[in-house]
Image (cartoon, grey):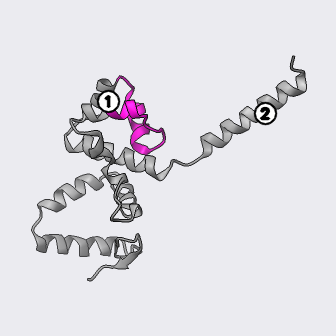
Amino acid sequence: MLDGASVGLACLTKETDLTESTTKSPDPMDIALGAAVRIRRRTIGMSQEALAEQCGVSFQQIQKYENGANRISFSRLVQIARALRCRVTDLLDVLDTPDEEPSVDLDLLSRMRTPGALELLTVYEQLPQDARTALVSFLRILAPGATPSVPTPNGARKREPA
């Protein structure tokens, strides 16, 4: 039989555990997997609502998966891959790059989570090279504090040639 002090201590411990787990930031791997799901979903033109319906979850849950706030179980990942008409390994490839530093891919996926990044990249790909160069120069003027750099295989950043 538990006395009042034991019950109180158990509740306090449980409350502390809950507080610690809710304030913890998402793991970079969860963020990367979520970003891979988002990129694939948007690439095929599927809404969060449509993906959620096919997986039997709410669109808010899909948002949490894509942001890395909630971890994706393996069985859910299989459902998501089927709904996105791809293989599970297609979504996991970014996490398994033995020849490169994973931080480079994680950094790229993190940047792809920025609202508008995928649309900007889609339009950018369609531009001729001279227009791309002009656009990058223009964007550097708009964001003077941004350091022009590119990721290197070891995750360090180096200055990009002007």
Question: Which residue extends farthest top?
Answer: 1
The quarter in which the C terminus is drawn is bottom left
Magenta segment boundaries in residue numbering? 56-79
Numbered label attached to residue 12: 2
Picture quadrant where residue 97 is located: bottom left
Residue beneath the point at 35% across and 73% down: 152
In screen coordinates, is 30 left or right of 85? Answer: right
Q: Quadrant of the N terminus?
A: top right
Depth check: give the residue in front, 10 or 143: 10
Secondary structure under tag 1 reads helix
Q: Residue at x 31, y 74 (%)?
A: 140
| Amino acid type, residue under disc 2 in the picture | Leu
Is residue 35 visible in the rendered image? The answer is: yes
Residue at x 45%, y 44% (from the top left corner)? 68
Q: Which residue occupies the foreground of this view, 83 or 61?
A: 83
Residue 79, numbered label: 1
Is 23 positioned to the left or the right of 34 in the image? right
Residue 38 at x, y percent in the picture:
31, 43
Gap between marks 2 and 1 measured at Cα: 38 Å
